[in-house]
Image: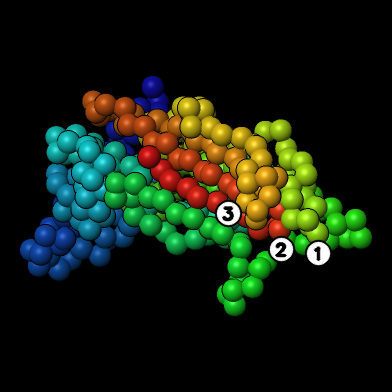
Amino acid sequence: MSGLLLAAGTLAAAAAMLQPVSAQAEGTGSSDTSGASATYSDLLASGDPIPLDSASTPEAQKFDSVAAGSGMSAADRQQMLESGSWVSYPVYATVSVDDGVSDDDDDATSAISGVQSVVTMTPQVSGAFDTASSSDGTAVEDAAPDGSGYICTGATNPTYTIYAMNVAKRKIYRYSLHEGYCREAFQQIVTSFDSAPTIHHHVYKWAALAGWSWGGQDLSGSKGPEYYKTLGKSHGGVKTWREGQFNYSPIRVPVGQVQFFPWIHQYGRGNGTVKDTWDID
């Protein structure tokens, strides 16, 4: 109950302070908005709800565009603006290919290592990463073979992590996949692999308070880990497909539950290269 009262107080305070910001965004020529602008920026950075009458600020317009592209009705978008819940809606996404974050890390604003470009979710995003060639086009291997030729990638095989972020690029949730395998480098074949991939998922605390939750693994599209033919060999690689589900039910807003499905497809090859593709449905 105390949490609800605190949230209500934050909403009221934000509503009282944001009129000058909205006026400036609409081009009314308001000249004394420095204090309100600072407060608005602070709220965006903290993830606190910011009630608005309309999509008048650039950030609210960005939310409105992304949510509309994802199929949210105009009435539901307006309700989210009025309640302040729009600040916890996912607007951007990115992927890390070198992610050492621990399971219990809950820092929603820390830098993401090994990050690819940040993209707008309109209405969904996808991408790929392939270590098959370096900048000069030559083949890249993860390690030189020893005398036996056997190499186990283990921790050196990339952990691919998808992040969804709000309009201020504050992290909402993350979903990651790692599949280790062993290969014979001279023949360029995969000789063994982990029986199941390592999956990590996390909803950041501020987002959980705003209505986000982990919905579980969606195994309808799962495949592997299993061998697949590549490099002209039946055991040339190992492929692993996994998909997660995250649910969003904005607190105090009677909109239908929104579901997001990030998925990762990883292909480890006998020559030491790895390809990952990803999407958020």
**What is the x, y in percent for residue 204?**
49, 40
Please state which amino acid type lies under the numbered disc 3: Lys
Q: Residue furthest top?
A: 1
Mark-to-mark CA distance, 1 and 2:
7 Å
Task: Pick whichever of labels 2 and 3 is earlier in the sequence.
Answer: 2
SS label for mark 3: strand
Please state which amino acid type lies under the numbered disc 1: Ala
Residue assigned mark 2: 141
Looking at the image, is 208 positioned above or below residue 182?
Answer: above
Between 226 and 233, the one lying in front of the other is 233
Q: Residue furthest left?
A: 28
Please state which amino acid type lies under the numbered disc 2: Glu
Q: Is residue 66 left or right of residue 24?
A: right
Between 10 and 270, the one lying in front of the other is 270
Report crowding for label 2: few under 14, some 14 to 19, many 20 or more residues within 10 A (C-alpha): some
Quadrant of the drawing holding the N terminus? top left
Instruction: Count all numbered tags in the image, as a single digit.
Output: 3
- Write the residue at 83% across / 61% down: 145
- Write the residue at 29% across / 38% down: 85
- Write the residue at 48% across / 27% down: 220
Q: Are marks 1 and 3 in contact (CB under 8 Å)?
A: no
Q: Which mark is residue 275?
A: 3
